């Protein structure tokens, strides 16, 4: 039976992690599933499961462990690490966990499945943005170029070993247009509303704008929120500045989670009246 890799869906870090695993284990040996927070997991009965840049809630993981042959979690989200604190004698024998909040999911996955090998530069740039550090030259432009490609393994495996400077040049105009659009849209569409008792900037915007728009709006505020509607409910993406609130704690009030300055959650449309109070 093929291994099952569950990765963070609609996320460059998550797909980068999945690509690292596919290169290591071979595409014919692994099934891939894009994990979405607050969605149920796929059937894991009898399978060897790898979760990368993603983790379900503890009760769900323990239910999965009762069915799976083995489960390996490679993640870096603060809320997941806190949720998965389990007494040593209560950890199932077939469950292994690696949490490292100093690295991104893609880099954790590469180092785990490619021990002793240099991390590809593209994954380091993915990490640089995912951790919102921007310590490496050209990260914004390289990521803008990367985001212009679909989440397809054959394409990403080629990009992974491409010249970063070529990606950077290709991404310059894309990045310029990206920020122009975001800033203009914020100017005409952002408004203030209440989330969990906090008056914060809000913007109805697509998920691929949420990080940059949220950080722009969140400067000098407790945090900011972007949201978009799906058939399952309204998804909220929270961002805060370094001196802002821990948004993973805000997201946890609604069943979500993530990082200290970047988290999210989903509310059913019937539950939107809980948004202002957080309960």
Image: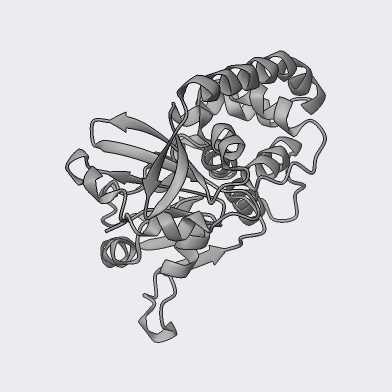
Q: Nearer the viewer, residue 60 or 184?
A: 184
Q: Nearer the viewer, residue 255 or 225?
A: 225
Q: Quadrant of residue 255?
A: bottom left
Q: Is residue 118 above or below residue 99?
A: above
Q: In this view, does 56 lie to the left or right of 242?
A: left
Q: Nearer the viewer, residue 131 or 162?
A: 131
Q: Residue at x 65, y 24 (%)?
A: 144
Coloring basis for residues: one colour
Residue 148 can be seen, yes or no = no
Q: Where is residue 81 in the image (x, y as percent from the top left)?
A: 49, 66
Q: Nearer the viewer, residue 124 or 141?
A: 141
> Which quadrant does the C terminus fall into?
bottom left
Q: Where is residue 149 in the image (x, y as percent from the top left)?
A: 57, 20
Q: Position of residue 20 (x, y in %)?
A: 59, 42
Q: Which residue lies furthest to the bottom in this view?
A: 89
Q: In which quarter of the image is residue 250?
A: bottom left
Q: Residue at x 44, y 74 (%)?
A: 85
Q: Is residue 180 left or right of residue 7?
A: right
Q: Residue at x 41, y 46 (%)?
A: 6
Q: Which residue is drawn at 25% across and 51% down?
A: 274
Q: Is residue 81 above or below residue 52?
A: below
Total number of numbered discs in the rendering: 0
Q: Position of residue 168 (x, y in %)?
A: 77, 23
Q: In this view, does 204 lie to the left or right of 212?
A: left
Q: Quadrant of residue 134?
A: top right
Q: Residue furthest left?
A: 270
Residue 226 can be seen, yes or no = yes
């Amino acid at each position: 039976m093929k291994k099952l890799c569950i990765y963070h869906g609609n996320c460059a870090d998550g797909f980068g992690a999945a690509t690292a695993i596919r290169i290591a284990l071979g595409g014919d040996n692994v099934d891939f599933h894009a994990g979405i927070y607050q969605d149920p997991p796929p059937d894991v009965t009898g399978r060897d499961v790898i979760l990368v840049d993603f983790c379900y809630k503890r009760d769900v993981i323990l239910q999965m462990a009762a069915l799976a042959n083995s489960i390996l979690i490679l993640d870096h989200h603060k809320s997941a690490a806190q949720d998965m604190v389990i007494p040593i004698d209560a950890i199932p024998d077939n469950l292994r966990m690696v949490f490292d909040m100093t690295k991104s999911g893609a880099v954790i996955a590469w180092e785990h499945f490619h021990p002793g090998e240099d991390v590809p530069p593209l994954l380091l740039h993915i990490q640089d943005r995912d951790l919102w550090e921007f310590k490496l030259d050209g990260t914004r432009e390289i990521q803008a170029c990367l985001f212009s490609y679909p989440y397809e393994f054959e394409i990403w495996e080629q990009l992974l070993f491409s010249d970063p400077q070529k990606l950077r040049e290709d991404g310059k105009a894309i990045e310029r247009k990206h920020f122009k659009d975001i800033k203009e849209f914020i100017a005409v569409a952002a408004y203030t509303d209440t989330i969990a008792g906090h008056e914060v900037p809000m913007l109805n915007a697509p998920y691929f704008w949420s990080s940059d728009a949220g950080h722009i709006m969140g400067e000098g505020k407790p945090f900011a929120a972007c949201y978009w509607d799906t058939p399952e409910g309204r998804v909220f993406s929270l961002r805060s500045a370094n001196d802002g609130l821990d948004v993973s704690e805000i997201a946890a009030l609604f069943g979500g989670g993530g990082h200290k300055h970047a988290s999210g959650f989903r509310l059913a449309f019937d539950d939107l009246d809980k948004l202002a109070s957080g309960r």
